Image: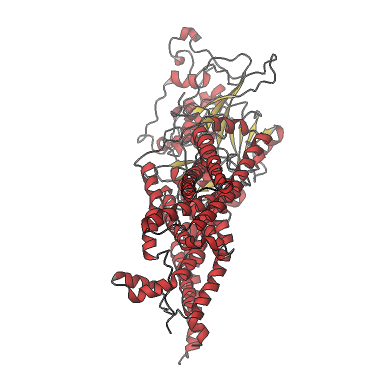
Amino acid sequence: MSLDRREFLAKGTMFLLLTGAASRAWAFIEQGRPQDAPDYDIALHWWAMYIDIEKCIGCGRCVDACKVENDVLPEAYYSRTWVERYIIPPIDPADPMAEILPIVDSPNAGRDGFPAVPAIAGAKSFFVPKLCNHCADSPCTQVCPVGATFRGPDGVVLIDKTWCVGCRYCIQACPYGCRYFDPRTNTADKCTLCYHRITKGLTTACCEVCPTQARVLGNLRNPDDPIHQLLKEHNVQVLKPNLATGAKVSYNGLDGAVR
Amino acid sequence: MPQRFRDAEHLVRLVLLMFVGVLLFLVIRTFFVPADFGEFGHFRAGTLQDIRNLPLHYASRGSCGEADCHEEEAAALASDTHAKVGCESCHGALAAHAADPKLAKAATVEANVLCARCHASLAARPKDFPQVEIETHREGEGECTECHDSHEPTS
Amino acid sequence: MHTLPGVEGFMYPNEMELQWSILIVIYPYLTGVVAGAFILASLQRVFNVKAVEPTYRLALLTALAFMLIAPLPLQLHLGHPERSLEMFLTPHTTSAMAMFGFVYLWYLLAVLLIEIWLEFRPYIVEQAQTASGVWRLFYRALTLGSYNLSPRALEIDHRVGRIVTVVGIPSAFLLHGYVGFIFGSVKANPWWSTPLMPVVFLFSAIVSGIAAVLLIYLVYCRLAKIPVDMPCLDTMAKYLYYAFLVDFSLEMLDLIHRIYVSDESFKSLDFMVHTRLYGSQVVGQIVLGTVLPIGLLGLTQLLSLSVRVRKRLYVAAGTLTMAGIFLMRWNVVIGGQLFSKSFLGYTTYKMGFATREGLLPALVVMALPLLVLSVLVRLLPPMEKQRPAPPV
């Protein structure tokens, strides 16, 4: 059988295309797809968190546990989670128009708890644990130029450290200050919602050690998850709602002064 | 070649050069972009598994009282006000210890510091949370554990 | 209280260190000169402003020199510069930074290089036949194998060049407007987030580009010992003046709007401008870098002054302008990171010296475009008035 040039080109191209397609399909199969791993079905999860300000005692165990669990550098400026203390002085009836600025501190990100401070008569004070809000319309993933940070199908915002170029645009774009630059990997880093734990049926490190259950992990896709009841029974807010980030960390008892 | 093409020949060559450049770019692309990029969204799908494979340092509450290990402490805890406090809240990360108790010892807890961490009186704490002024509590002397069993603190 | 030295009030823990350094100040500064120099060059080509013809080639070469060096501060800044190709391989289409990579590439390859090539082709062809040694090879490569300089070929070059310039003007607008958008679209940062940002960046780019070419032209004439074409210089100064008026108006509009609307971020930003940014913004950028040069240029526009006085004023105004536009970039980039998003605190920028993002590499990067330009003007002389007679 002899092939003329045109036939050869046609058959050759088809062969190459099919081989190329076949090899890509094989690589795809060999990759190992997370949702096929035992027990964890990515499609059944949409992760969120509920934080009760009225229960937080500012002990900082969450901050400590996160650092240990996720092997984070010890300094305060590498914080995946942290606790802030708000002290809001009262309105002075003699000068009610005066601007009241809250006094906020977070010594070592709250990891060692909080020292007692001189009391301000009539002041209101409370603790605010903060972490990545795993926003549904996350501004940080929107700006990533290369697709290194993303919102996964189960609602967790993650970073691919093998792909991140370290431009730090995402750190600038996060309104909550939850991202930082890890000098060991020269990439952006942040709370992963302990993805390595929650996909194994465990809870996040911070929720695990919270002594008062001020932090509760929730799966919004599960109709029996307690988070639905919590969200229904309490007046909840997210941080910076005016920015419409679709933040998935809901706070009970969040004072309007909290930024 | 017709005359008008001869006069624009250099432009034709330029366009050809650009075309070659684009082809080169597409070839480079197939080599450097991971095969699973874009499967679930604009990211490398394999990273989900990579992150899931990260090591655990904390175990979970409940894993301490099973397998004939710390049933006594777990039972005492469950019956008192510290029931909702996880073991690792005070004892630190214990996944390694749970996996091999002889290989990884649990860290000992410095009671006075740790008890004060939650129970020292702070204005910002919820009013209904048990707090004491550490300095004046029993004149600020002694160890917390002299009077309070850490697993059954109110008994 | 465990905070970093230099932190005042409360900042989120991760905000205490600045992420974008002086290198990210330099990058928009360099690309701004690119856009501005090109727009000056286009004045002659597209709008037939004959007066600036002597600087046409010099402006193009200035744009190229700055454009070749501009990616360098970015590469020095990236955590993984070896992965920077990813911006072209897997660009995220929602990211202004990713799309900007293509705008930059388009502008460099489809506009600037082609326009320079078409403009210098007669010289290139001549050198390919007469130069010696390795330079001959260099010019031969640039000819792409074509030595056709017939009147018809040159006519085609001229027409295609005109099309490229026409396309180039919106491309130049896009080039620097995009950089402004990279900042202006960050809703998390109230110092950056304004729709005016791309426009302000663009007009300050035009200002810096014209001022740069003006100064470079004077230096070039001095070094090449050729007389300065005063009508050209006067026209450049006139366009600089007009561009500056628009730029200043836009910046004042932004400021007045902020003061009037006075949203929740205003008090914190206002405090920052009056303390940490006072020197660089109020004194440096506004008074010395904008109002003063506008005043000096205005004098030359309104009064009839001698050539010597005009030249001195142009040099003074041009230098102040370049410093002022640099400070504008500084105040945007660094200023945007000095305050906390809690509006309750401030930090300071600690710049290293001999570190990867320190002052030393910054100074080197700033000097490099001029170095590259000095090489380019040797390879492609901008004042070469003669064109070779077409081969018969």
C231 w.r.t. A111: above or below: below
Quadrant into which the C terminus of chain C falls: bottom left
Please tell me in which quadrant of the rendered image residue A248 appears: top right
Residue A237 x %, y %: 66, 35
Residue C26 visible (yes or no) = yes
A59 w.r.t. C155: above or below: above
Residue C181 x %, y %: 58, 50
C159 w.r.t. C343: above or below: below
Number of marks present in the image shown: 0
Please tell me in which quadrant of the rendered image residue C352 appears: top left
Foreground pick, C154 / A93: C154
Q: Outermost residue toward the bottom?
A: A1
Residue A202 visible (yes or no) = no
Foreground pick, C195 / A86: C195
Q: Outermost residue toward the left?
A: C133
Residue at 52% x, 39% y is C285
Residue B57 x %, y %: 44, 38
Residue at 58% x, 54% y is C94
Left or right: C285 as drawn, with respect to A71? right
The colour scheme used here is secondary structure
Residue B137 x %, y %: 50, 10
Q: Outermost residue toward the top?
A: B139
